[in-house]
Image (cartoon, rainbow, N blue to C red):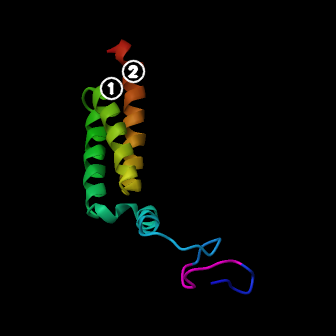
Amino acid sequence: MINDDGKETFHDSIDTPFGEEIGEEYVTAREVQTNPESRESPTAGRTVGYIALALSILSLFTVPVLFGIGGVIVGVMARNRGARALGTWAIVIGTISTIGGIFLAPFS
């Protein structure tokens, strides 16, 4: 079917730049891009975020380099899963603790 603009279209309800027919694979990939948490439970990111925050806070009191780096890594994972605030706090606290532990280790 050719519309008034001279473009060939197959389906009028799909809004694409070229008026083309879209396969099911594209629609499925588009849904995953718009909602990346569709396959995970909503609490999965928060749980990882709380674990990251616990590791980072623990690093303030014992083995700052080990637990601090662990808190930063798990914090990044939490941010990727949707727990942005918890992940950011874990990254910041873990980084401060790790850097502080490295610089204060020679004095202890």
Tell me which corner region of the image, top left, top right, bottom left or bottom right, holds residue 7: bottom right
Residue 60 visible in the picture = no
Q: Is residue 9 magenta?
A: yes
Q: Which of the two residues, 108 or 51, is positioned nearer the viewer here?
A: 51
In the displayed structure image, the side of residue 12 where residue 56 appears, left or right = left
Magenta segment, prevailing SS (helix, strand or loop): loop
Q: Residue at x 34, y 31 (%)?
A: 69
Residue denoted by label 1:
65
**107 versus 27 height, above or below:** above
List x then y, in percent, for residue 33.
45, 61
Q: Are marks 2 and 1 in contact (CB under 8 Å)?
A: yes
Q: Which of the two residues, 3 or 93, is positioned nearer the viewer here?
A: 3
List x then y, in percent, for residue 96.
42, 34
Kind of residue sitting beneath label 1: Val
| Helix, strand or loop for disc 1 | helix
Give the magenta-colored segment's residue range: 7-14
Quarter of the picture holding the C terminus? top left
Q: Residue at x 42, y 41 (%)?
A: 92
**101 versus 20 height, above or below:** above
Residue denoted by label 2:
102
In the displayed structure image, the side of residue 18 where residue 83 appears, left or right = left
List x then y, in percent, for residue 84.
41, 55
